[in-house]
Image (spheres, rainbow, N blue to C red):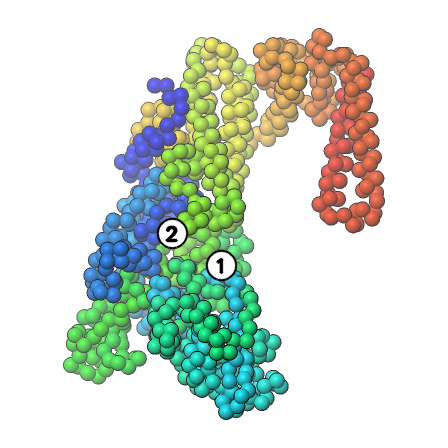
Amino acid sequence: MALEATYNSQTVEKRWYSYWMEHNYFHSEVDEREPYTIVIPPPNVTGVLHMGHMLNNTLQDVLIRRARLKGFNACWVPGTDHASIATEAKVVAKLKSEGINKEDLTREEFLKHAWDWTYKHGGIILDQLKHLGASCDWERTKFTMDDDMSASVIKVFIDLYEKGNIYRGYRMVNWDPEAKTTLSDEEVIHIEKQGNLYYLNYKIEGSNDTLTIATTRPETILGDTAICINPNDERFTHLKGKKAIVPICNRVIPIIEDEYVDVEFGTGCLKVTPAHDENDKVLGDKHGLEVIDILNEDATLNSFGMHYQGKDRFVVRKEITKELEAIGALQKIETHTNKIGTSERTGAVIEPRLSDQWFLKMKELAQPALDAVLEKEVNLVPEKFINTYRHWMENVRDWNISRQLWWGHQIPAYFYGDGKEDFVVAESLEAAVPKAQKKSGNSALTASNLKQDPDALDTWFSSWLWPMSVFNGIMEPDNKEINYYYPTNDLVTAPEILFFWVARMIIAGYEYRGEKPFNNVYLTGIVRDKQRRKMSKSLGNSPDPIELMKQYGADGVRVGMLLSSPAGNDLMFDEDLCKQGSGFVNKIWNAYRLIDGWEISESLEETDTSKIALDWYRAKFQMALAEIEDHYSKYRISDALMATYKLVWDDFCSWLLEMVKPGYQQPISGKTFRSIIEIFEDNLKVLHPFVPFISEELWQHIAKRTPKEALVVSQWPELKPINETLIKEFEFASEVISGIRTIRKQKNISFKETISLHIINNDNATTTFDAVIQKLGNIDVLTYVSEKIEGALTFRVKSNEYFVPIEGAINVEEEIEKLSEELKYTEGFLKSVQGKLKNEKFVSGAPEKVVAMEKQKEADALAKIETLKTSLAGLQ
C-alpha cells in the first residue's frame, strides 16, 4: 500500500506507541545481557509537562533507545515525587476554595484529601511523557510515597540517627512563611533587590544623647535586645557601659562591645535582634542576650509587635517608618541594594527563625561523594560543573531535614515527656514503646503516652535514595535487581538540582552500597525564550508542550529541542525550531515516498553511476556513524543529531537519491533498489533514537515484520572500515557538479538541455565519479583536453579548469572588459585596506574586532583577485 501524500503524526504516534506497549518492548527483567539503566528524575506528582521536562526526557529517551538498539538490556525507571511543599500548598489552596482550613482538620483527614488529590492528578505528567514517545519501563513506575519507598526512607533515618549522624537542634533556620515550613540552605534562592536603609535614632538612657543605627528592616526593632559597637571604634568610647532605649516599645537594652561590628558599614552601631538574624543569634549567645521573637509562623507580628499585632511584616515596615518619623526617631532613608533570600518553592521572602529541627551531619558523609567526582569515578558532563560541585561539597553545611508539613514521610521520632531529649526513634509506634520504656526507665509507659513528631521529612530525603530504592536496594540490599541494575549508567538532569539531588544521591550511594549510583551525569541547560528569559507560567512565555506536539508532531518537537541543546548550555527555544524539526520529518517521509514510487525491473543491469553512488554513500554512512558514535560517547547529543540530520538530508536525500533515481517514467534496477532499501534501513536505525515514530512507521512499511523484527528492538549498524579515498573523490566531484549548476543558473540554461564539458586535468583528479558528473550535470559529452576552449563558460575546482562551450553564450571582448574593470576596482580596494593594516597607529589603537574585520576584507579581496585573474586568463 502506497504511503499517504502527507505525514499524519497523530495517527502514526498513537499506532506505534500502542504497538510498542502491547509487545512490552520497554520492559526489562534481569538476564544475561549487560544492563543499561537510567532512573528518571521524578517530576512532582501533581505537575504537568513543561519545556524543561520535554528536553530532559527527550535526552533520556534518545539514550535509552540507542542502548536498546545496541543490544543492552535497557531499563528506564519512571516515577514521581510526592513534592511535600508544592503538593501540600495545592491541597491547602483547594481546601480553602471549598471553605475548609487545614487547621480545622486532623492530620488523617488532611492526608485523605492529599491522597485524593494525588490519585486525581498523579498520573497526568507520566501520560504526557507517553505522547513524547518516552520508552520507560512503565511496569516499574514508582512513587516516593509507595509503601516500600516509605519503608526505605524510615529505615535510613533510623540508621543514620543510630550512627549519630542525625540530631535534633534548636537553630536559626530558613523559614518560608507562605508554606509555613523550614527550608534547607539549598532551597533558598538569593536575589538582588533594591530596598532602603533606614537610619534610626535611639536615646541613651539617663541623657539627651542619641546613637544612630542603620537597618534594612525597621519592623524588627521591636525584637532588639542590645546595641553593639566595635571596642576599637574611637567614635563610641563614650557609649561603653551605657544603655539605649528602643524607640516605640521603649525597651532598655545594653550597649555591648564586639569586634564583629564592621566600623565601615552604616553608622558603626549595630542593633542586635537574636531571634531574627543568624549573626545576631551568635552575638546573643556570646553575650547572654534575651531572645525576643516578634513574628508568627505566617510572618505577621505577634504580641511583641504591640499595636502592630496581626499585621504582615511588610505592611508593618511601611507603618512603623511613618511612626518613627512622627516621633523624631527616623533620621533619614537611603536606597540600598542587598541580597534577599527567597523560597525556591513559593517565592516568599525567607525569615530567619529559631526553631527545633532535625539535622543530618554532612561533612564526613560528603567526602566519598566529593572524591568520586574529583577522581572521575562519577563523570559530570560538561566538566565545568566540577568546580561548582567541589565548592559546595567542601563547604557543605548540616542538612535541615525536617519540614513543618503533613504531606510526606512523618519523622519516626516518638516523644514521651516534655524534655528536649525525651524521645526515641523507631520504625513504628509499637517498636517505640519498649525503647521509650528503657530510655525513660519507666516500664509503665504505653503507646498512649507516646506522641509522634508531627513534622515530615524533606522531600529530597526520599529522592536521594531513588537509584537504590526503585530496585528495593535499601530494604533488601542483596536482591538480584539491585545487584544487576545498580550502579545505573546515566543520569540526565538540570544543573539547578546538582546539590539538591545529584550530590545527595552520590552521598547515599557510598553510604549504603559503598559505590556510586551512576557513571555519568549529563547536565542539561535551562530552556529559555529568545530574550534569554527562563520559561515560566508567570511570564507566559512557555508554550504548552502538548499543543506543540499536536502542531508539529512529537518527532518534530524532539528534533527542534535537540537541534540547539548542547550539554550544560541553555537552550534558546524558538517555535521555529519545532518547525524545522517537522520539516526534517517531512523530508524523511518524502524521501521514502520517492523510493516507494519507483518501478522495479529485475532484468535491468545496475548502472555505473548507481554502483559508485552506492559505494560512496556506504563509505559516507560509515564516516558519519563513527562521528555519531564519538558524539554519543562524549554526550554531545545535539551534535549527534546534527551529524544524523546532515547525513540524511544532504548526503542521502540531496545526493544519493539524485544519483540513483531512474529517468522519467523509467524503471530502476532491482539490485539498486534493494541496496537503497538496505541503506535506508540503516538510516532509520540511526534516526530512531531521535524520531522514533516516523522511523518505526517507515520501517514497518518497507516489509512485513514480526514483532521481534520491529525497529525499536532491531540492531544498531555495525562500524566498518571507511573508504576515505572515495569520500575525497566525491567531494571533488560535487564541487564540479556545483560549478556546472552555477553556470546553468547564471546563464539560464535549462537542466533538461544537455551540455558538453571539457576538462584540463591539472590536478590529476580521478575519473571515478565522471558518470555521476554526467548524470547530475546532464552532460552529453565529457572529455579531457590539453588546451583552453575559446569562448566557453569556465570555472575552476582547485587547479582543474572546466569549459562549457555554448554558442553565443558570451561576448569575449565584453566579458574581458567587465572582468578587467572589476579587477581594477578590487585591486584599488585591497590597496586601501592594506594601507590601514600597515598603519601601526590604527592596528594598535583600533578595537580587536575592527582589526579582524579589516584582515578579513584583505583575505576576501585577495581571493577575489585570484578568481578574476583566472577567469581573464581563460578568456585571453
Q: Mark 1 and 2 residues: CB-CB less than 8 Å, in contact?
A: no
Q: Residue at x 37, y 75 (%)?
A: 307
Residue 196 relative to residue 235: left or right: left
Q: Residue at x 50, y 29 (%)?
A: 648
Q: Residue at x 82, y 26 (%)?
A: 824
Q: Please determine whether, in this image, residue 817 is positioned above or below residue 636.
A: above
Determine which quarter of the picture holds residue 166.
Answer: bottom left
Quarter of the image with the C terminus in it: top right
Determine which quarter of the picture holds residue 690.
Answer: top left
Q: Amino acid at mark 2?
A: Pro
Q: Residues within 10 Å of mark 1 (few under 14, many from 20)?
A: many
Mark 1 secondary-structure assignment: helix
Tell which of 167 and 39 is nearer to you. Answer: 167
Q: Please determine whether, in this image, residue 388 is positioned above or below residue 439.
A: above
Q: Badge 2 is on which residue?
A: 41
Q: Residue at x 40, y 37 (%)?
A: 548
Mark 2 secondary-structure assignment: loop
How far across and how far down the image is residue 134, in percent?
A: 36, 41
How far across and how far down the image is residue 665, in percent?
A: 47, 10
How far across and how far down the image is residue 476, in percent?
A: 28, 59
Tell which of 251 and 36 is nearer to you. Answer: 251
* Residue with the most extreme front position: 326
Q: Badge 1 is on which residue?
A: 373
Distance between mark 1 and mark 2 Cα atoms: 20 Å
- Name the front one of labels 1 and 2: 2
Q: Please determine whether, in this image, residue 353 is positioned above or below residue 777.
A: below
| For marks 1 and 2 on the same chain, the one whose residue lies earlier in the sequence | 2
Tell which of 865 and 691 is nearer to you. Answer: 865
Quarter of the image with the N terminus in it: top left
Q: Is residue 539 visible?
A: yes
Q: Amino acid at mark 1?
A: Val
Q: Residues within 10 Å of mark 2 (few under 14, many from 20)?
A: many
